Amino acid sequence: MAAIRARVVLVTVPRGGKAESLAEGAVEARLAACVNIVPGVVSVYRWKGRVHRDAESLLVIKTTETKLKALERWFKERHPYETPEFLVLKVDAGSKEYLAWLTQEAR
């Protein structure tokens, strides 16, 4: 069986139009096949010695292993945070048809 090279990347962004523009830009640049925007996320985290609570959206990005470095660089150049979240999850399985589509669209 061929190795699955699909990846899911999680990126949080401030609520509002930034989520949509980043999602559309990543797909238009062919760095991602699909980006889901999950609104209404509340993030609680420690940053520079203080606990923060922020309203955010979560981007769930479907891409391929070969696009990861370019995708991360692209987000760092456009993301409003000093240290944006960029977590990569390996895909162990998926439908043959969906994985083929994902690979085609993120070529």
Image: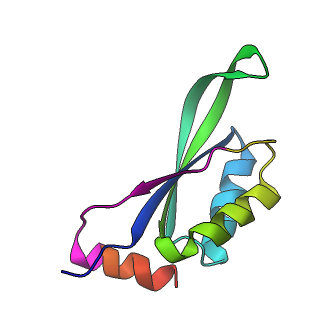
Q: Nearer the viewer, residue 72 or 27?
A: 72
At 38% from the left edge and 73% from the top edge, which residue is drawn? 5
At 51% from the left edge and 79% from the top edge, which residue is drawn? 106
79 on left or right of 23: right
At 72% from the left edge and 64% from the top edge, which residue is drawn? 73
Asked if residue 59 is positioned above or below residue 107 in the image, the reply reads above
Q: Residue furthest top?
A: 50
How far across and down, in percent of the image, does residue 41 sit? 55, 31
How far across and down, in percent of the image, does residue 7 sit? 43, 63
Q: Is residue 50 magenta?
A: no
Asked if residue 21 is positioned above or below residue 42 in the image, the reply reads below
Q: Quadrant of the N terminus?
A: bottom left
How far across and down, in percent of the image, does residue 2 sit? 25, 81
How far across and down, in percent of the image, does residue 25 sit? 69, 68
At 56% from the left edge and 43% from the top edge, which residue is drawn? 58
5 on left or right of 17: left
Q: Which corner quadrant of the image does residue 27 belong to?
A: bottom right
Q: Which residues are magenta?
A: 85-98
Q: How many marks?
A: 0
